[in-house]
Image (spheres, helix red, strand yellow):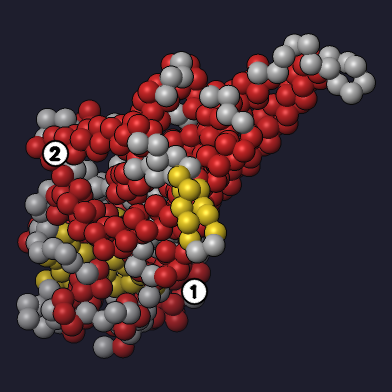
């Protein structure tokens, strides 16, 4: 089924909607909950330090593992998965800042150390998008990919641990214990807390959040946002490494000499400069290639959703766009409708004038549909001479007026092709189906509109027929849209 091929990863809202929709009741709910969870993240961060939950030795049989319990980790990850990366990155940063300040670090060092929190959230969320991980983790493959994303995110954010160790002048053994505790404890929290919560509570929680917003979530990451995320992560990692190196060099006495009796600090500074330039070059190169790949991916995705002949969206695009439009229609308390359109006697036109003329007929019909339809209506070439119009936030009774306008526009103007002896008169048959009830399955509407179009053909063509009530219900819809009549089958009547 084509509908299963579209993106399955996390959806998101930009955090700017807190300002844009501040006066709505739903956004006030979101603001309260997000603020409460942010305060909870900050409080538990300070509590974890006060209770010494960092690098706690835990025995498992004959082995001892260092485990760090850091509640803001799973709080911010859940916020990012359910709402978007910005919603998790900000609490992650604030929690780490207050943790570092409580430990006695300066504001500057605390701010740099705290960059590890946003890095972790952004890398994990970005990995979910790249790996196409469903936010509810319904399958074992989703869980495995999510755990892999978590491990990558923990590794990236662990750079902050080295800043912590250097800032607190910890010896090597203690510093390694803290690092192991962060990695092991973080992975255990992701596996034992985040995964079960997302799997068992993810869907109802996402639906609750979804109902509070006045705009539908975004389901893709465009070129601009991809570049911004890559640059932000790169900048934060460079800042962490640079500050960590500076702290290490600061702790070395100026009188320290190498084995050859040369001053050590100038050599270390030279090595640090070389490493910094290397890191900046690697991250800059990575950012450039990531940006290029994002732009290429966006361009290829746009091409893959278009029909090469007419420029309309294709069938795959319908299943990609329908959930978003249905969600928007539901929010507006309006219906959603589809129109199935079939060019009459198209096979005869092909047989009499040739396939090149047939192609021109399809392009002409597309232009006429665009003229007659509204700005918000979406046009799809379903296959052969069949088209589908998706009418967002349109009640079924109003969809008929759009269909009649399309029919009149096409039949009123014959197609004149240079080199042919006479204009080609064109007519179309249209079937209209819609609903005000949600949730709605796209295949159900397509099947009902197709049945109505079939009746229009039977009744003499060149007319609009509304969905025959009772003939096809949503429960009768096939799981595979290929079960609806295919291109050319209507003209067999």
Which of 417/350 is in front?
350
Q: Residue 34: where, in percent of width, then height?
A: 23, 37
Q: Residue 412: where, in percent of width, then height?
A: 24, 60
Residue with the most extreme front position: 62
Q: Secondary structure at mark 1?
A: helix
Q: Residue 266: where, in percent of width, then height?
A: 80, 15
Residue with the most extreme top position: 255
Q: Earlier in the sequence, mark 1 or mark 2?
A: 2
Q: Secondary structure at mark 2?
A: helix
Which of 167/317 is in front?
167
Q: Residue at x 19, y 43 (%)?
A: 213
Q: Residue at x 55, y 46 (%)?
A: 180
Q: Residue at x 38, y 75 (%)?
A: 1
Which residue is disc 2 drawn over? 29
Q: Residue at x 44, y 58 (%)?
A: 146
Query: Where, by quadrant of the figure, is residue 84 drawn?
Result: top left
Query: Where, by quadrant of the figure, is residue 37 drawn?
Result: top left
Q: CA distance from mark 1 to mark 2?
A: 58 Å
Comparing labels 1 and 2, the label whose residue is closer to the camera = 2
Does residue 300 appear left or right of residue 394 in this picture? right
Locate the C terminus by quadrant.
Answer: bottom left
- Residue 355: image tag: 1
Which of 449/218 is in front?
218
- Residue 209: image tag: none
- Whether residue 261 is visible: yes
- Residues packed near mark 1 inside 10 Å, few (<14), some (14 to 19) or many (20 plus): few
Which of 236/251 is in front?
251
């Amino acid at each position: 089924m084509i509908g299963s091929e579209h993106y399955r990863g996390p959806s998101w809202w930009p955090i700017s909607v807190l300002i844009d929709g501040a006066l709505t009741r739903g956004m006030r709910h979101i603001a309260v909950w997000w603020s409460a969870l942010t305060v909870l993240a900050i409080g538990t961060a300070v509590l974890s330090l006060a209770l010494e939950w960092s690098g706690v030795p835990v025995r498992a049989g004959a082995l001892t593992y260092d485990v760090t319990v850091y509640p803001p980790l799973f709080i911010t990850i859940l916020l990012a998965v359910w709402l978007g990366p910005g919603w998790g990155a900000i609490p992650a940063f604030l929690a780490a800042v207050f943790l570092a300040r409580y430990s006695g670090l300066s504001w500057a060092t605390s701010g740099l150390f705290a960059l590890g929190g946003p890095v972790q959230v952004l890398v994990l969320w970005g990995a979910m998008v790249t790996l196409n991980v469903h936010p509810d983790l319904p399958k074992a493959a989703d869980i495995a990919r999510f755990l892999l994303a978590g491990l990558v995110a923990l590794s990236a954010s662990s750079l902050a641990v080295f800043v912590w160790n250097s800032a607190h002048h910890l010896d090597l053994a203690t510093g390694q214990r803290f690092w192991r505790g962060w990695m092991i404890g973080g992975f255990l929290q992701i596996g034992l807390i985040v995964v079960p919560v997302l799997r068992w509570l993810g869907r109802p929680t996402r639906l609750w959040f979804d109902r509070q917003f006045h705009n539908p979530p975004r389901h893709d990451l465009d070129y601009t946002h991809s570049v911004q995320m890559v640059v932000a992560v790169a900048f934060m990692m460079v800042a962490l490494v640079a500050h960590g190196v500076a702290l290490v060099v600061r702790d070395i006495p100026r009188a320290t000499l190498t084995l050859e009796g040369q001053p050590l600090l100038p050599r270390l500074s030279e090595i640090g400069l070389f490493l910094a330039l290397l890191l900046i070059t690697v991250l800059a190169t990575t950012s450039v290639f990531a940006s290029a790949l994002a732009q290429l991916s966006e361009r290829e995705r746009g091409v893959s959703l278009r029909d090469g002949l007419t420029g309309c969206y294709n069938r795959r695009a319908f299943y990609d766009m329908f959930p978003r439009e249905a969600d928007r229609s539901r929010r507006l308390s309006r219906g959603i409708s589809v129109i199935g359109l079939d060019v009459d006697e198209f096979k005869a036109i092909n047989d009499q004038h040739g396939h090149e003329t047939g192609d021109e007929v399809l392009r002409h019909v597309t232009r006429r549909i665009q003229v007659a339809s509204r700005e918000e209506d979406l046009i799809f070439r379903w296959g052969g001479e069949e088209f589908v119009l998706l009418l967002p936030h349109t009640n079924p009774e109003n969809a008929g007026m759009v269909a009649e306008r399309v029919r009149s526009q096409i039949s009123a103007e014959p197609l004149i092709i240079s080199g042919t002896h006479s204009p080609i008169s064109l007519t179309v048959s249209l079937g209209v189906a819609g609903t005000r009830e949600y949730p709605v399955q796209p295949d159900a509407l397509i099947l009902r509109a197709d049945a109505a179009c079939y009746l229009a053909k039977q009744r003499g063509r060149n007319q609009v027929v509304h969905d025959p009530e009772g003939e096809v219900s949503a429960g009768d819809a096939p799981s595979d849209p290929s079960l609806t009549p295919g291109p050319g089958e209507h003209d067999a009547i």
